Image (cartoon, helix red, strand yellow):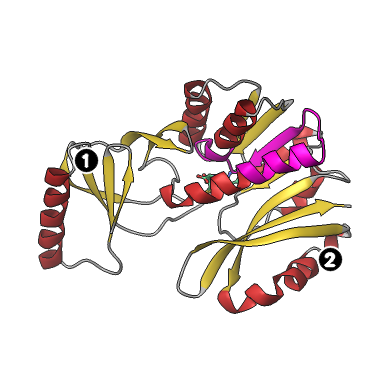
Amino acid sequence: MYDQIGKIAVLNVKGEIKKENLKKIKEIGKKILKENKHLETILLKKEKIKGRLRKAKYKHLCGKKNFETLYKENNCLFKLNLEKVYFNPRLATNRLFVAQDILTLIKSKKIRSPKILVAFCGVGVYGVVIGKILKKEGLNYKKITMVELNREAIKYAKENVLLNKLENFEIIQGDVKKILPRLKEKFEIILAPRPKLKNDFLKEIFLVSKRGSFIYYFDFVKKEEIGNLKEIFKEKLKNFKKRIKIFKIKKAGEISPSKLRVLIIFKLI
Ligand SMILES: C[S@@+](CC[C@H](N)C(=O)[O-])C[C@H]1O[C@@H](n2cnc3c(N)ncnc32)[C@H](O)[C@@H]1O
């Protein structure tokens, strides 16, 4: 199985790869390259994403040795370097779902010129898909603020906003834990496609939210917990003394055989 990201194909092989298997994998790579004229580079994803910046390591198998690519998704263009940033093309459907949900929300609740925050923006994928969908529908947003720790990702996020001819973006490099308390403003819509790390960043998210804010929060749960996620999430929020209304809980991907990524959409009331 492989993912196509622009002119790069990435092979995903589970488990440890022995030397004799690597030869076979290279042959598969060469075959893919030969059969798909639009591809230029074949990479092998070496290990799972790691560290705060959630980067993966790749081995170059064949074709042009290049890790930067131009990728099209949801009518948007994205430039990114696979080695330097987090990126997962399989999450394109999540991005479209979130953007369409925000569009419906703005229309149905008649939210005028909202300020939208995307914490953990990576190369700007969520912000750009949302901005593009709102622009297409002729809906205004006051600004879309994006925050990201990885300097390389920030560089691409800025470029991607320009590539998609979008305006009114504020792009901030830094730690969400430090940046959000400094913003001293509240957002109507907050999106947190957060990394699977110990910190849940809820404290910082609440600092930039107000009564009526809609929050799109990604969490990670055990598969058996999915049935009572509402209760588990409400319990998690107990210490914050916030009243919330949960609108939707949606599976947003499998991260291991026993764990899921979920999207929780809730409102502060
Ligand atoms: C799961 S990735 C999501 C990236 C992007 N939203 C996407 O969907 O492609 C999480 C991102 O959070 C960034 N990150 C991790 N810890 C952070 C922090 N404390 N403050 C800001 N960004 C952080 C990582 O560098 C990574 O780009």
15 lies left or right of 155: left
Tell whether position 232 is magenta: no
Residue at 89% x, 46% y: name it: 211
The image position of residue 28, as x and y in percent, is 14, 56
59 lies left or right of 150: left
Of labels 2 and 1, the one closer to you: 1
Tell whether position 116 is magenta: yes
- Please tell me how crowded label 1 is: few (under 14), some (14-19), or many (20+) other residues with Cα within 10 Å: many
| Vertical arrangement, residue 202 with respect to residue 230, above or below | above
User: Disc 2 or 1, which lies upstream in sequence?
Assistant: 1
The image position of residue 88, as x and y in percent, is 43, 49
Residue at 64% x, 29% y: name it: 137
Residue at 48% x, 32% y: name it: 76
Element assignment for label 2: helix
114 lies left or right of 17: right
The image position of residue 258, as x and y in percent, is 50, 75
Total numbered labels: 2
| Vertical arrangement, residue 210 with respect to residue 134, above or below | below
Going by the numbered disc 1, the residue's amino acid type is Thr
Occupied quadrant, residue 227: bottom right
Residue 238's disc number: 2
Return the residue nearer the eye: 45 or 74: 74
Element assignment for label 1: strand
Occupied quadrant, residue 99: top right
| Vertical arrangement, residue 30 with respect to residue 19, above or below | above
The image position of residue 134, as x and y in percent, is 64, 31
Q: Which residue is mark 1?
A: 41
Task: Please provide the residue range marked out in magenta.
Answer: 99-126
